[in-house]
Amino acid sequence: MTTSRTYKDSMMFYGGIKLFAGTGCPHLASQIAEYLHIPLSGCDITLFPNDNLFVQLHQSVRGQDVYVIQTTSPPVQRNLMELLIMLQTMRLDSAGRVTAVVPYLCYARSDKKDKPRVPITARLVAEMIEIAGAERYMTLDLHAGQIQGFFSIPGDVLSAFHILTVHIRKRLPDMKDPVVLAADLGFAKKGRNFAASIEAPIAFIEKRRTGREDNPEALTLIGDVRGRDVIIVDDEVDTGGSICQAVELAQKSGARNIYLVFVHPILTSGAPEKLAQLPICEVITTDSVPISEEKRAVFGDRLKVLSVAPLLGEVILRAHEGRSVGEMFDE
């Protein structure tokens, strides 16, 4: 990934860049602002006793190129409503262009009708973001590629695996015959791309879900991991159930050392404690979702959190200037 000029050198097609942050990922938003060398613009976000949210900007955004940075990880309903209300506030204040920067998009797993009488909530979320006032969107590593089709507005669906790959390459000299293990067959294509980027073979976990969607049962490991260092990859880790089963299968299949790599650290329902008990050499993830100090302490020095701020900051700059994002990845 190559970088570009700072904000001060940019051409302003929509007036100046204005960055606003919700309460979902304030540290990440601050790092993006630092990368662009511009301050976060001020706004008041108030939660009333009746659980209603209120947003008021500190200054006008009329004619400006506005970027609202808000992840929609837990608490999902609070973070999502904050995002929608902020987007509408920008539109009603006559912003020149409004872009929703959503490092983690909620409800991404509800992307199809795979059972009778169920919703496609990912499409509903996409439509709400548009109706609220977003004219563009940016996000990282959607659970399924077809979610892009739920949006009628242009957007940049980025991958943090470019960042994760750089870190893993630094570890390769210390690994023995590394192999990438995709946590499930649904992640097979992305897992294959990750394996190709570090020039390693790939294996797969074949699993089925029994009953509830959050209760998967891992069945078989497809591929050869015996006597090799294993890099388990996935897009997100929620309760940690699938990863625990993947590690167990890898061990039973003769894996040597095990590394865990994923983009979105949701880490609910005691997931940090579960993962910390596993024989994993290193847990490598990003700050697309904030990880509390309490959760970090559970992992100790085995946790490595890589920042996606330079990636998002550079894409914001290129979107503002009307330049190619694909050039960052030689595409």
Image: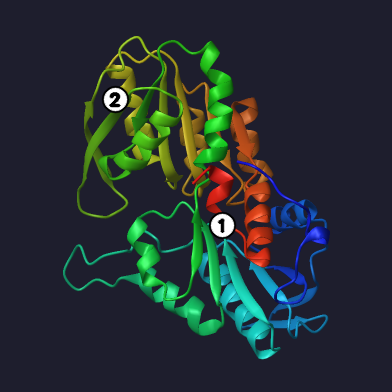
Q: Which residue is mark 1?
A: 103
Three-letter amino acid code at the position of disc 2: Leu
> Can residue 51 be seen in the rendering of this structure?
no
How far from the left and from the top, in percent, is residue 147? 37, 63
Q: Is residue 28 above or below residue 273?
A: below
Image quadrant where residue 222 sits: top left
Q: Residues within 10 Å of mark 1 (few under 14, many from 20)?
A: many
Residue at position x 41%, y 23% in the image? 199
Q: Is residue 118 above or below residue 74?
A: below
Label pair 1/2, CB-CB below 8 angstroms = no
Q: Residues within 10 Å of mark 2 (few under 14, many from 20)?
A: some
Three-letter amino acid code at the position of disc 1: Pro
Q: Which residue is mark 2?
A: 249
Image coloring type: rainbow
How far from the left and from the top, in percent, is residue 75? 55, 63
Q: Which tag is nearer the camera, tag 1 or tag 2? A: 1
Residue at position x 24%, y 71% in the image? 118
Say which quadrant the N terminus sits in.
top right
Q: Is residue 299 above or below residue 187?
A: above
> Can residue 298 be seen in the rendering of this structure?
yes
Q: Is residue 46 left or right of residue 101?
A: right
Q: Is residue 167 left or right of residue 39?
A: left
Residue at position x 33%, y 61% in the image? 146
Say what secondary structure mark 2 lies in: helix
Q: Is residue 157 left or right of residue 86?
A: left
Residue at position x 68%, y 55% in the image? 313
> Who is closer to the viewer here, 59 or 166?
166
How far from the left and from the top, in percent, is residue 247? 36, 27
